[in-house]
């Protein structure tokens, strides 16, 4: 210290200033070099991360395109399978159905239908119609024969034995050795008999150039391998030598060490579905850092530029951190809103259930697109179950709309086909997102066991009685597809103890960690295991436990919804009388109602009101349903479960809805008041509810009254 001071105290001021500047420059140079080294290593790490991200983006886009191609082929098969099944009864029409099948997808170049041996005795043991696209045309031929015995093909036997669709590994075919892959699917006829294996061929020749069209770096390239590691397609031989590609494949398969090609980075991803192909991207690590090294060598000369770049990068890092923080806060806010939405959605679903009905929903996400609901009116339980396409918030919003529409429409409409028609028209209005929903609804008469139902593309429910079978419900189209879709109403009368089990595809398609589905067969086994007296809640609990036990630790992939309705009328008092359309028959009616009420815990005042209401209704029917004194009959059925009384009045007269008659205005005097309406007013005052429907050419009027 003292030596330093003594030297500088005797030194010339100009020399001292120069040394100071040199010292400052030296210190600045050291600092810049330290900054340069730190910055270089930091930037190098960021560049490597960026390379990995860019590689992941490119690979993700490539894999999505490949999987989209496969999914389009699978969808083509599934959407046109009905046409193939329809033609199975006529061998000569199979060729036309194959033409339609491959013409539906531009990526499909050919298709075949290899029948089970001797399926058509008239055409011999083997029969394989084949359709192929050639030069813009589709030609068909029967290719099976002594020189082409497809029963020896491993893919054919695998699909027959497993009864599962399957993709082949790519293979070369034809004089040009083009690459193809085939999607095979088992086909059953309408009798459930296994008929054939249908195959669709797609051309993979173009895939190599497409995969390598947009690479993140000049030296990078992509390859597609089979699950076993065989090369499907790779880069063009003009850009990369076959030797380099072959060595890369050997490194991936473990037959060559990674050091065989120094400085080469390899990334790969594998499909999580059949056919489990592997997508590989290769690039040179040093390629991205060459320019950065040159910039580092020049950095000592351009100190100010280096400092400016450092300031710019620091500012950029700060902005990135701020954006990340804002994104995290936004994510937290959205999570909170989704939690609130889930609670709101759950509150919309039924919470309490009578003994004869029970349902549950288990959403795969915070909010789901499944719906079920029920309510009781006029001695009937109205119920529904549905599955909206897609998941998340859009599906949940559409589900809420469907549930509200169902409640609003079914409160006034008894015919399920009319309810579905109105729901479908509303869903088609302004449906720019092209969402749709499968939907099943019905109404069960709690006295007679008659169920009226209509289906909109939903899975057929199980009917559980002495035997277990699928309800023969006509599928129809889902809601929201075409506004003019017709939904056919069907009816079925339940025997006491009959149970209807409804579900969404989240049950049958629940998968375990091996990607195997729970399936309809497992549902059938659980239903068989339920005891005869099992309650609807017991049935739902048994199936839910079985599905979760099967899935194990696999995440839930779809909403799981179940609804069970059981017809258990207990002891129902029922009597019936038939009257001619003559006012003199009212005396018989009065005696009938009086005798019926005498068997019930009904006080005299209520019994008198029931008799008066029914007399008013029947007199209206006699006066208006049979004009010109035509002969006719009026049938009255009385039912009671000792808690409620229901009268059903049926006649074959002209369509006449007494409930549509305007009630008389009792505020007017008798001279100015229009004729009619007093009987309807009186009946409505005396009964809890009155409903009308036209069924099978007959007027059906139902009057309900709670007695205890």
Image (cartoon, rainbow, N blue to C red):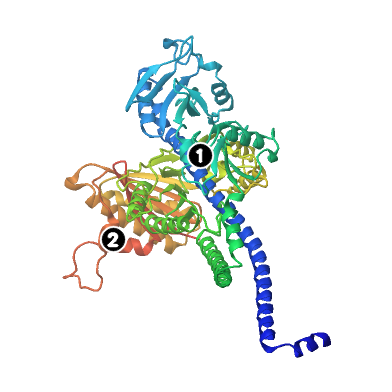
The furthest residue to the right: 2
**Which quadrant of the rendered structure holds the N terminus?**
bottom right
Where 540 falls versus 462 (above or below)?
below
Q: Mark 1 points at which residue?
A: 495
Q: Name the residue under label 2.
A: 679
The residue at 32%/28% (across/down) is 136
Counting from the top left corner in percent of width and height, residue 546 is at 65, 43
Q: Nearer the viewer, residue 172 or 698?
A: 172
Cα gap from disc 1 to disc 2, whole angstroms: 37 Å
Q: In this view, does 303 lie to the left or right of 657?
A: right
Q: How many labels does the image show?
A: 2
Q: In this view, does 487 lie to the left or right of 252?
A: left
Q: Examine the image and state in which quarter residue 664 appears.
A: bottom left
Counting from the top left corner in percent of width and height, residue 48 is at 61, 55
Count neighbours of disc 1 (C-alpha within 10 A) and say few if under 14, some if 14 to 19, many if 20 or more. some
Counting from the top left corner in percent of width and height, residue 492 is at 43, 39
Q: Which of 624 and 475 is in front in this view?
A: 475
Query: Which of pointers 1 and 2 lies earlier in the amino acid sequence?
Result: 1
Count neighbours of disc 2 (C-alpha within 10 A) and say few if under 14, some if 14 to 19, many if 20 or more. many
Element class at badge 2? helix
The furthest residue to the bottom: 9
Q: Is residue 369 left or right of residue 530?
A: left
Front position among marks 1 and 2? 1
Q: Which of 546 and 18 is in front in this view?
A: 18
């Amino acid at each position: 210290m003292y030596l330093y001071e003594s030297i500088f105290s005797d030194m010339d001021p100009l020399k001292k200033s120069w040394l100071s500047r040199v010292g400052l420059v030296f210190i600045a140079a050291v600092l810049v070099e330290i900054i340069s080294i730190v910055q270089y290593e930091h930037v190098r790490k960021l560049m490597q991360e960026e390379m990995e991200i860019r590689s992941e983006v490119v690979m993700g886009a490539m894999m999505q395109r490949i999987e989209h191609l496969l999914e389009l082929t699978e969808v083509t098969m599934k959407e046109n399978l009905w046409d193939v099944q329809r033609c199975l009864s006529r061998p000569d029409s199979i060729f036309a159905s194959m033409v339609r099948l491959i013409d539906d997808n531009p990526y499909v170049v050919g298709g075949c239908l290899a029948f089970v041996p001797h399926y058509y005795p008239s055409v011999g043991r083997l029969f394989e119609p084949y359709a192929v696209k050639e030069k813009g045309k589709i030609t068909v031929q029967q290719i099976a024969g002594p020189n082409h015995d497809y029963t020896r093909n491993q893919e054919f036997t695998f699909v027959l034995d497993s009864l599962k669709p399957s993709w082949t590994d790519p293979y070369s075919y034809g004089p040009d050795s083009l690459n193809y892959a085939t999607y095979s699917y088992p086909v059953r006829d309408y009798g459930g008999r296994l008929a054939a294996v249908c195959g669709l061929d797609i051309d993979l020749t173009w895939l190599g150039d497409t995969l390598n069209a947009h690479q993140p770096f000049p030296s990078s390239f992509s390859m597609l391998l089979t699950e076993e590691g065989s090369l499907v397609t790779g880069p063009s031989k003009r850009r990369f030598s076959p030797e380099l590609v072959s060595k890369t494949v050997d490194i991936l398969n473990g037959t060559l060490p990674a050091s065989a090609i120094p400085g080469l980075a390899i990334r790969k991803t594998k499909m999580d579905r059949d056919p489990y192909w592997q997508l590989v991207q290769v690039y040179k690590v040093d390629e991205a850092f060459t320019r950065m090294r040159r910039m580092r060598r020049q950095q000592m000369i351009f100190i100010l530029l280096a400092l400016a770049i450092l300031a710019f990068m620091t500012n950029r890092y700060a902005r990135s951190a701020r954006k990340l923080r804002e994104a995290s806060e936004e994510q937290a806010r959205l999570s909170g809103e989704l939690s609130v939405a889930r609670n709101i959605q759950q509150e919309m679903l039924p919470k309490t259930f009578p003994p004869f009905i029970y349902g549950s929903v288990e959403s795969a996400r915070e909010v789901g697109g499944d719906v079920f609901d029920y309510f009781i009116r006029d001695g009937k339980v109205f119920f529904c179950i549905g599955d909206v396409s897609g998941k998340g918030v859009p599906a949940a919003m559409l589900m809420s709309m469907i549930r509200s529409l169902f409640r609003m429409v079914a409160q006034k409409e008894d015919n399920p086909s009319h309810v579905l028609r109105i729901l479908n028209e509303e869903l088609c209005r302004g449906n720019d997102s092209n969402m749709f929903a499968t939907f099943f609804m019905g109404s069960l008469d709690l006295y007679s066991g008659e169920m009226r139902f209509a289906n909109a593309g939903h899975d057929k429910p199980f009917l559980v009685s002495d035997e277990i079978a699928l309800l023969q419900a006509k599928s129809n189209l889902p809601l929201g597809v075409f506004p003019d879709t017709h939904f056919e109403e069907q009816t079925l009368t339940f025997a006491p103890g009959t149970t209807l089990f409804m579900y969404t595809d989240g049950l049958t398609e629940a998968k375990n960690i091996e990607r195997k589905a729970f399936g309809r067969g497992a549902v059938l086994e659980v239903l068989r295991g339920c005891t005869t007296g099992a309650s609807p809640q017991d049935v739902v609990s048994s199936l839910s436990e079985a599905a979760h036990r099967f899935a194990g630790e696999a995440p839930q992939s779809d909403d799981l919804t179940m609804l069970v309705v059981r017809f258990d009328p207990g002891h129902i008092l029922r009597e019936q009388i038939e009257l001619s359309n003559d006012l003199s028959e009212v005396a018989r009616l009065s005696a009938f109602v009086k005798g019926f009420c005498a068997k019930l815990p009904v006080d005299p005042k209520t019994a008198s009101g029931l008799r008066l209401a029914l007399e008013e209704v029947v007199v209206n029917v006699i006066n208006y349903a049979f004009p010109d004194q035509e002969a006719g009959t009026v049938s009255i059925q009385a039912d009671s479960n000792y808690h409620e009384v229901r009268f059903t009045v049926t006649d074959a007269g002209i369509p006449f809805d007494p409930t549509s008659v305007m009630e008389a205005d009792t505020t007017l005097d008798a001279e100015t008041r229009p004729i009619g309406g007093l009987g309807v007013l009186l009946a409505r005052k005396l009964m809890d509810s009155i409903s009308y429907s036209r069924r099978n050419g007959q007027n059906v009027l139902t009057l309900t009254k709670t007695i205890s």
